[in-house]
Amino acid sequence: MGLRIHFVVDPQGWCCMGLIIFVWLYNTIFIPKVILFPHYEEGHISAVAILCYYFCSLFCIASLLRASVADPGKLPENPKIPLTEREFWELCNKCNMMRPKRSHHCSRCGHCVRRMDHHCPWINNCVGEDNHWLFLQLCFYTQILSSYTLILDFCHYYYFLPLKKDNWDVFVCRHELALLRISAFMGLIILGGISGLFYTQLMGIFTDTTSIEKMSNCCEDISRPRKPWQQTFSEVFGTRWKILWFIPFRQRQPLRVRYHFANHV
C-alpha cells in the first residue's frame, strides 16, 4: 500500500504485541464458535451479527498490524531541508541530526521521529506523524470489538434462548463457562485500558498536542495559533474525507502544513 516497512527489534515489544494478538485470536475463534454460530443455527440471531463481528475483528487486526510495521516518521540520515523552512528545524542533541521541530528522539528505537507522540510497546513501534492515524483506528476498533464481545457474553446467558447443544464440540461443551469467563475478563481489562488511552489521544488531537509535549509542559496556549479540530484531525489522518478516517486499507497522503504551527521538544 505504499508504506515503508519499519521493524523494531525489541523482545519486550514482541511479547506485548504477541499478547494482544493472542487475545484477538482467542475471541475471534471462540466467540463465534460458542455464541454466534450456535445461536444463528437455532434462529436466535441473524447473519448480520456474525458479519459485523468479523468485520470489527478484521479492521482491528488490520490496524494493529499496519500500525506495528508502518514507518512512524523516521527521519533520513541526510534530510533535505527547504530554504523556506530552515528556521523550523533544529539539531538533535542525541543523534546530532537535523530534525523538524516537534520531532523527538526515541531512545528505544534509536532515531528521531517526526511529531512523535510516544513509543507504544503494544504495537512494538513509535507512534508518530505517519502512523498515528493507524494507532487511533486500533484504539477505536479495539473498543468496538471488546464492547461487542462483552455484550455477546452477557446476552448468551441472560437474554438469548438456551441452546440445545446437540452438535457441539465436546471440549467447547465441557468448558463453555470457563471460555466465556476468560473472554469477559480479557474484554473488561482491554476495554478499560484502551478507553482511557483513546480519550487522551483524542484530547491531544483536539488541542494539537502530543503526549511527549504534555509531559514536558512545553506547549503554552500562546506558543502557536489554535487550529480547528477538523484541521488537526485531517492532518493526522491525511485526508479531509471523514469516512476515510475509519478505513485502515489505504495509503495516507500527508497534508502539507508549515512547521511554524508547531512547538518542539
Image (spheres, rainbow, N blue to C red):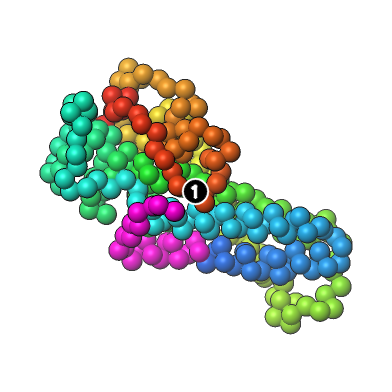
- 211 left or right of 39? left
User: Foreground residue, 180 or 132?
Assistant: 132
- Residue 53 in picture, x, y percent from top left: 67, 57
83 relative position to 216: left or right: left
For the C terminus, the quadrant is top left
Q: Which residue: 52% across, 56% down?
A: 62
* On screen, residue 218 above or below 10: above
The answer to if 53 sits in the magenta stretch is no
Depth check: 15 or 228 in front? 228
Label total for image:
1
Quadrant of the image occupied by residue 222: top left
Q: Which residues are magenta?
A: 1-21
Instruction: Identify which amino acid the numbered label 1 is placed on.
Output: Arg
In this picture, residue 259 sits left or right of residue 132: left
**Which residue: 86% across, 73% down?**
164
244 to 30, vertically: above or below: above
Provide residue 52's location: percent of width, then percent of height: 69, 54
- Residue at 37% x, 61% y is 13
Asked whether 58 or 164 is in front, the reply is 58
Q: Place residue 35 in its image quadrant.
A: bottom right
23 sits to left or right of 96: right
Residue 94 picture location, percent across and down:
15, 45
Question: Residue at horizontal 66%, vertical 69%?
Answer: 30
Give the residue pinned by disc 1. 250
Observer able to see residue 57: yes
Q: Position of residue 99 (x, y in %)?
A: 21, 38
Q: Secondary structure at mark 1?
A: loop
